[in-house]
Image (spheres, helix red, strand yellow):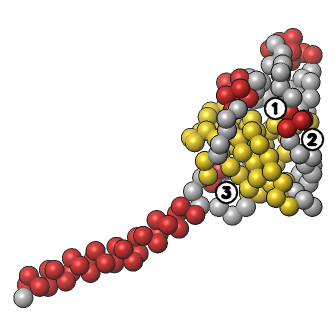
Amino acid sequence: MLRLFAIFVVSSIFLFGFVVVIPFMLSQNLFAIVKGNCPNVNFLWEHTFEHRRFVEHSPPCVVLEGVINNDPKISDEGDGDFKFDVTPDKGYGELMNTNNGKGMVIEIICWSQPQPSYIKQHGDYCKNVNAKSHFPSLKYNDHVRITGKWVQDIGYPKPDHAQWNEIHPVEKIEILTKK
């Protein structure tokens, strides 16, 4: 009788594991970070201004879907990058950290010619990069899918700034819904 009771208990635990744990594991996969396909990311990374100011996350290439929440514009840093923020769709928020106050930071490198002082100090890091011809026109409230390098900005332009996460450089952008 004790043996039958032990078999019942073990079987119940095993069955309970299938009923509860399997759906839990599947639901976690719904919100997992989506690994992207970035065949040009090494080229882009080598042309990213001062890329040693970033910590690379894993996986290095990710996909983010969300809505552009500000007006995309040339960065005021003078490095030639095109910059905007994205409010992630449900399931993509874990790409950010607590310092991403305005959403996920997105930067397309070498959108315009860097300021002469940057080129003089750092060389022509945008040479042979023609970003404008590879990306669609973007505006506030566009719903987009972005693929690119997932990094954390750890100290530029000031070493005491908040260390937010970014997709920088961007490999690909698709407009899902234009507003």
Quadrant showing the C terminus: bottom right
Upstream in sequence: badge 1 or badge 3: 3
Type of amino acid under label 3: Tyr
The residue at the point 64 percent across, 46 percent down is 36
x, y percentage for residue 94?
Answer: 63, 54
25 or 162, nearer to the observer: 25
- The secondary structure type at the circle numbered 1 is loop
Q: Which residue is labeled 2 in the image?
A: 73
Q: Nearer the viewer, residue 93 or 144?
A: 144
Residue labelled with disc 3: 92
Q: Mark 1 and 3 residues: CB-CB less than 8 Å, in contact? A: no
Disc 1 and disc 3: Cα gap in Å? 22 Å
Quarter of the image where the N terminus is located: bottom left
Residue at 61% in and 34% down: 56
Mark 2, secondary structure of its residue: strand
Q: Residue at x 90, y 35 (%)?
A: 132
Amino acid type indicated by mark 2: Lys
From the top left corner, tell me how far across and down residue 55 is, in percent.
62, 33
Q: Position of residue 93 (x, y in %)?
A: 67, 56
> Which secondary structure lies at badge 3?
loop
Q: Is residue 32 above or below residue 112?
A: below
Which numbered marker is on residue 109?
1
Give the CA separation, mark 2 to mark 3: 23 Å
- Mark 1 residue type: Ile
Q: Is residue 80 above or below residue 166?
A: above
Q: Earlier in the sequence, mark 2 or mark 3?
A: 2
Chain-order first, disc 1 or disc 2: 2
